[in-house]
Amino acid sequence: MENDTSTSSPPFEIFRTSEVHYEHLPVSEISASGQGIPSDLFASREKISEWDTLERTFGELSRHVKEQVATAGPRFFQQLKGQELRNLAYEPSFVGGQLDRKNLRMYEWQRGELYIHSAALILDPETTLEVTYEPEGRINRLLQESDHRKITYLGELPNGVSQDEGNAVAVWRTQQGKSTAAASDAEFLDDLSDIYLDPLREALATRRRFIDEYSIEPHRIRLSYDNQPYEVNYTKTKFRRAHLHALPVIREAPLAARESIVASMRGTGEFGARREARARAVANRVTQADRPDTAAATPSKYALLWVRDNRDLGAFMDTKPEILKQSIEALRATDPDRKILLIGDNLFKGRPELFSAFQDEGVLDGVDSETLIRFWAAEKNDGTALTHGEQALALHYLNTDADIVQVGIESGALESAICLGVPTVYFQANEHVADKGTRWQLYWAKWSYGESRVAEEADGSKKFFASGRPVKRFDRSGEIYPPALMTVRRVEFGPDLPDPADTEAEPITVYYPANITVGIDQISTLVESGGLTDMARAFDQEWSETAWHTSEYYVDQIHRWTRVETTDWEVAARRYEAITHALNGMVHPGDDAVRHAYENAGYHLAGPQGQADGSRTASDEISAAYHTAPQDRGTAVTAILHGMLGDDGFKARCVHDLRLVALSDEEQAKFVSSVIEVTAANNVLREIGKIAPDGSPTTSRHIAEALSGLLPQQHEPASVGREELSARTDKPDSWAAYSDAQLTVFQERTQRAAIQAGERARELDQQHAALRTAFEEQDGGPVVAQLRAQGAAPELIERARDAAVQDIAYAAQTVVETRTAGEAAAVRSQAIGSELQRRAALSPQQRQTEELARQALAAQHTPPPLAATRRPEPGQQTPGHGQSL
């Protein structure tokens, strides 16, 4: 978590070790047969007509509900949820977690699911979709936000309304840009009515998007109503089914799939022509200034750096400012001809200090931070905002006309462009790689189908992690498929899980940056919007003396936390958690639960106070505010808070905390190599076209095979004339061109690689022996034995037997390759050690002469990258040891 990375520009040397290794892609293990189960769950004509009418007359439904609530009171909400809203839709269909099923489902609030589900519906006509709404779920999510941001309803609640509903309304009003408290009971009940109705409104709007934006037939989209606990329907939905049914079509015909998606998003006739024109206008705004003079000129090159800035419960996926800065600097250093544009949200909205810091450091020099920021907005598109489909079309046309790459944190907004073949590099926290990351891995990893089950010890007992969760193994059936897209790569960052193999462990550190982002935004909003002034009304003149002392304690704690210096994600996150908790406690001093929660969380800070202005301590100022007349105390205290939270020093600490998440040198190097890979893959596809050299339709396998030969040539090291150092440099294993510090690092890496490879080889050897034993004892292995017991057809049994033979051969080959890699690493480590010993025996004058020669060469040439011995990736391992879906 601690970040010791300098915020200055990275040394170019870190990019010299950028390696392209297409062959070492992992295998996504999919617990399914791969033979999809078509869906016949269509919407009836009556329901289609009912929903169409409801869209047009939703305002009437809203007025009816609010009139009923005004007459019957809050008890009408039970009838609304239990009957009126339920009767408008189907019950959720059965999925049962079965990945082969094609009755897809997404919930109306999952806006990021729109992109991949639209691709699945377009590419696989056997799929259908349920758009599900859950009014009670909306309340629960608002309460999560209330708890996370410590937002409570401070006004008087109408009779019959719970505090939870009040807190939900407070968050809802905040999201609408209103004060947390309603002006009257009627206004409060109107807000609560909107909360219960909004899921249906959003479900109808989402259905309409699929129909109008993606040309999906209305009967293939149903609305469903879900009032069950999440484990009943939500967790059994398996949203990655959209990827599993869309991506095989792209794998087998990437260009034809692209044409289908474009045609569906564009539409036909005058409607389609207008959509295309609007989308092309966006692409033209980007290329116009850089358009080549001649048609034969090389296409312009662009890097589109996505900014996601939601600042809500999903803020763990928001753009990390320092990673954005590092991405810009890496692209400048390695691909200076590629113009950089920021795209998406405005990272600097409400953050003038961050913008000033980036400007002062030259981060934004030459970066277009205007053209594509909120490029969909109405004011940039002749008064009508771009729709989701038009946005994707704009990126498609830009990819057609130019050489582009899009970069961003994992987010649904990237997915339409991904399916359209836009080269993409995305960042993902290491803690998420093995759980939610398995979905996106389907884009760029190899695939295998099979069965996942609990692994067993040698004695036949079930195997468990230290956490108590079961260890899973995967039994592959059939072939390993090539990646669906060669134009996508992932760059992992940050700490991993304590036990990376225990993939169901709860991520922890990944949420610290989110807490920082949300906390800073909430505090900034309070200061800038006058929210602190509103809080003054929550101070009650009738509080007891004890309550006043408790309130003062919280303000003191806020001041202490504003002065904490941080170098660590966790401490920084705790700063904002503590401040928002203390703000809540300040206006609820009589709530013992709030005080106990604050202390039990370890937020309490002790120690001497700092100076407020040079003459009076902050403690004196806080005490003076709390000794004003009771009727004036709220105003006096919030004025003190305004000074604390609006202080330039605190704002600087906020900017510092926002920038704590950064890429390591290795992560930056992987980013650079990933950009090279995805842009090369796009160029290969352009060169090949629809028909591959062998005369068959182009598939992702053709692109992969072409890349395996192309990319190593791109990274062929330049000659550096090392004969100038000594005659030793003509030998293949010479290390004379590298500094002592570099060689020491390389030796440590190769020693570690040799040890790891040896350990892995022994583990794989045991697995190979186990496979052979099972094959011999069960005349083909456990799968064959099971098929025989079930009376399966002979040809199926024979296929399973052949697959088992292939598994054994593959396992034996992997053992040999891993052992050979370990031995090569050991030899390399010894060679480096010999060079270090040779240098140690040189005289000071000889060492100085060699060092000067090395420096002279370094100024002119790039030393060749060391080919690190690589530990086998999941794609090279025996079945059962990849990342299971």
Image (tube, helix red, strand yellow):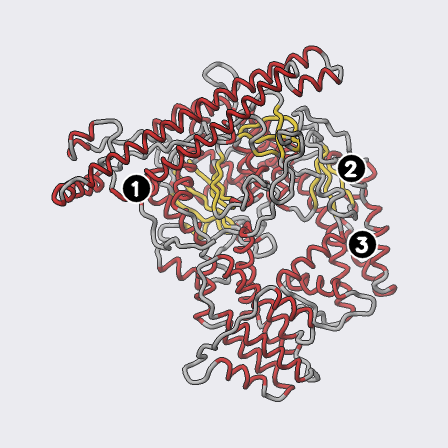
Please give the residue where the numbered disc 3 appears in the rendered image.
Answer: 61
Task: Give the amino acid type for the residue marked by disc 3 in the picture.
Answer: Leu
Closer-to-camera residue (69/33) = 33
Give me the C-alpha separation between circle 2 and circle 1: 60 Å
Residue found at the far top of this picture? 794
Which numbered circle lies on residue 93? Answer: 2
Give me the C-alpha separation between circle 3 and circle 1: 73 Å
Residue 707 placement: quadrant: top left
Residue found at the far left of this picture? 845
- SS under mark 2: loop
- State the image coordinates of residue 198 (x, y, percent, origin top left): 73, 54
Q: Earlier in the sequence, mark 3 or mark 2?
A: 3
Q: Quadrant of the C terminus?
A: top right
- SS under mark 1: helix
Task: Give the amino acid type for the residue marked by disc 1 in the picture.
Answer: Thr
Task: Give the amino acid type for the residue marked by disc 2 in the picture.
Answer: Ser
Q: Earlier in the sequence, mark 2 or mark 1?
A: 2
- State the image coordinates of residue 476 (x, y, percent, origin top left): 61, 24
- Disc 3 and disc 1 in contact, CB within 8 angstroms: no
Please give the residue where the numbered disc 1 appears in the rendered image.
Answer: 744
Residue 268 visible (yes or no): no
- SS under mark 3: helix
